[in-house]
Image: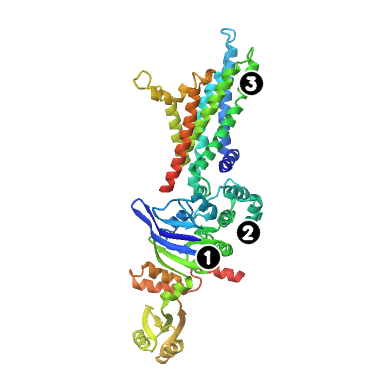
Amino acid sequence: MRNIWIITKREYARYFTSPAAYLVAFLYLLVLGIIFYANVAASAMNAFMRPYAPGIDIIINPITTLLVFITPALTMHLLAAEQRNGTLELLLTAPIRDWELIIGKWLGSFLFVTTLTLITLVYPVTLNFLVKPGIDWGPVISGYLGLILMGAAFTALGTAISAMFNNQIAAFVASLAFFLLLWIIGFPAHGLGGSEIWQYLDFSNHFYNTLAVGIIDTRDIIYYLSVTAFGIFAGSIIVETRRWR
Amino acid sequence: MIDVQNLTKTYGPRLAIDNLTFHANKGEILGFLGPNGAGKTTTMRILTGYMPPTSGTARIAGYDVVDDSLEVRKRVGYLPETVPLYPDMTVIDYLIFMGKLRRTPNVEDRAWEVLERVGMAERAGSFIGSLSKGMRQRVGLAQAIIHKPEVLILDEPTIGLDPTQVVEVRELVKEIGKEHTVILSTHILAEAQQLCDRVLIINQGKIVAEDTPQALQLRLQGGRRIIVEVRGDKIDALEKRLSGLPGVRGVGTISQGRLEILVEENEELRPLIARTVLENGYDLLEMRLAEMSLEDIFLQLVGEESETEQEQEESPAESEAPSNTPADEADEKASEEG
């Protein structure tokens, strides 16, 4: 545990000294702010014609999309940069186990992504003031639970993919491609026989119709936790096999 | 302290190290000497628990590097060839981070202590990215000794440094070697000669020789060489005369007018040679005793002399010239400073 925490603290702190991480965080919050503003403004202008209050989906759905794009940028360096730097040799000859290293790295990035996600809570709070009689907090709680779980799964996969590359850009592109695949994989399978497995793997099937609208289903939670576990396991195996080369 | 038996490592079809067996005692500085690609780094990586061997065993302080890898890693300090540093960290933060990973007690005090030791305390707050190569090397060394390891493994610790820095790092290694067992790889022979208690010469994954630097010299010398430079006609005739002298084993030509005379170990033949040269009407321009350097031994052992004998005969002679290698220059500088 102690080893994991040492790595995690270092990894989390690194985001706050890295200009790239600030840039990613800035763009994430900026884009989200613009979308939020546009949605609120649109419903305010339409208020006379078709009065409706914007729901929490105008915040949660864009965050999902943004997570697909920012997580690769925040996990790409985790192990790829260590390899490029030669510092991986140092970590792998320190008295820590490979899985402790991977969990430490994952936890650091997961905590940072979670931090960013929690900052976006300002939008539901703002929205609560804008609409009458306030928003339904149920979907906010389940939606943010889903976003945090999704962040855990994405960062775990990103960590594993970063372990495969010496080059951060390659790790970024590979992670992004993999996340996009996971996002849509259930869709082409619609209406085909034997498509359940692909539908199950598709993370959008575990979010938009359940957690995002206030339904907390253990099957969805298990899905995200198993993807996270898979990422950590795969990452540890990848680091381990690097030793044998 | 370090016990290696029949260690072998292959990368696919390529044999990186082949059946290495050696040991190192406590408090000893053991040098790995060999050309690039000889298998020095591979051996070190196995000893540090970075990669497992294909076959054979290595034990450090009684722990197997594969089975008890974590115990081994606790006891080993390692400085890889490319110094592993985080440019975005400050020197002190980096040392504390590494110290914590290696479970150093009182890590902050200890970090300052090693910084003092490597002479970097005044740069503790600097970002590593802004340090010069020599300073980075010292931070790398500090990182390797922070947890007071029983064994210190240094892969080419002086590579890429300027002569003053080379001297500084060597001094540091020497000092550290008083309390730790040190394994050090280098391809600079003077460095091995100067620092190591014992040298392993490795070539193409095999140990070709193992002994103290002095003993290696003695063993392979088997006689002394005298280099003379003369001026005059018909040097062939002089060569014949010289080879007829008692105690002379052979005479060879290095270049026009320069002769190499091999003589018996314990006879002082220089006055006789000088007289012979002068009495036969030649001018004596230079005469000196050439001891075989580790460089010559190395070349002999590695067996490259077979290609062009002329070239090889010349190179030992040249290597005797003072301050012809950066390392020698560094040594001289050190003695001047000292």
For image coordinates 36% across by 70% down, the residue present is B305
Residue lying farthest top?
A: A49
Q: For label 3, count other residues whose C-alpha is less than 10 Å away and answer few (under 14), some (14-19) or many (20+).
A: few
| Coordinates of residue B315 in the picture (x, y in percent) | 41, 72
Which quadrant would the C terminus of chain B be assigned to in this image?
A: bottom right
Residue B296 position within the rendered picture, expressed as x and y whole percent measured from the top left = 42, 71
Residue A3 is tagged as none
Locate residue A141: give its quadrant.
Answer: top right
What amino acid does circle 3 point to?
Answer: Val
Q: Which residue is mark 2?
A: B117
Front residue of A58 and B27: B27
- Residue most extreme to the front: B62
Which amino acid is tagged 1? Answer: Glu
Give yes or no for contact between labels 2 and 1 (Cβ–Cβ under 8 Å).
Answer: no
Q: Quick one: label 2 or label 1, which is nearer the N terminus?
A: 1
- From this viewpoint, is residue B225 visible? yes
Q: Is the C-beta separation of discs 1 and 3 under 8 Å?
A: no
**Residue at figure coordinates x 55%, y 34% from the top left:** A110
Q: Which mark is residue A125?
A: 3
Q: Which mark is residue B28?
A: 1
Q: How many residues crowd mark 2 within 10 Å: few (<14), some (14–19), many (20+)?
A: some
Element marked by disc 3: helix
